Image (cartoon, helix red, strand yellow):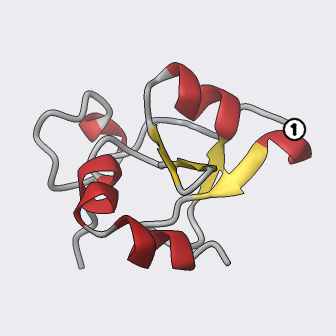
């Protein structure tokens, strides 16, 4: 099964299994990706890389560049994954 990360040719982290290492922070810095549910993400690292979107007053952080466009296609659906 492929993920959004492994199929994104513009992702510079493709040589690392399609994902950049976003596990840089402490427990209060961690969240999960709303698109690839359960994938841990460092908020600080994702924000520095531009891998986030604001929707309905909340900020959502992504595990890779492919998740932003997926989130944009149906933000309410993906935001519900974080509830």
How many other residues sit within 10 Å of disc 1, few (<14), some (14-19) or many (≥20)? few
Could you tell whether 18 is left or right of 57 in the image?
left
In the image, farthest residue toward the top: 48
At x 15% / y 55%, what residue is drawn? 7
> Foreground: 72 or 44?
72
Q: Place residue 80 in its image quadrant.
A: bottom right
At x 87% / y 38%, what residue is drawn? 26
Q: Which quadrant would the N terminus be assigned to in this image? A: bottom left
Asked if residue 33 is positioned above or below residue 9 in the image, the reply reads below
* Picture coordinates of residue 5, whole percent (x, y): 29, 53
At x 43% / y 27%, what residue is drawn? 50
The residue carrying mark 1 is: 26
At x 22% / y 63%, what residue is drawn? 73
Q: Which quadrant would the C terminus be assigned to in this image? A: bottom right
* Picture coordinates of residue 16, whole percent (x, y): 36, 40
Q: Place residue 82 in its image quadrant.
A: bottom right
Asked if residue 49 is positioned above or below residue 16 in the image, the reply reads above
């Amino acid at each position: 099964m492929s993920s959004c990360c492994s199929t994104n040719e513009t992702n510079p982290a493709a040589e690392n299994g399609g994902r950049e290492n976003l596990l840089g922070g402490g427990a209060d810095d961690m969240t999960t990706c709303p698109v690839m549910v359960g994938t841990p993400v460092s908020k600080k690292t994702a924000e520095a890389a531009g891998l986030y979107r604001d929707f309905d007053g909340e900020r959502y952080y992504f595990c890779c560049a492919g998740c932003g466009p997926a989130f944009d296609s149906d933000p309410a659906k993906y935001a519900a994954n974080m509830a």
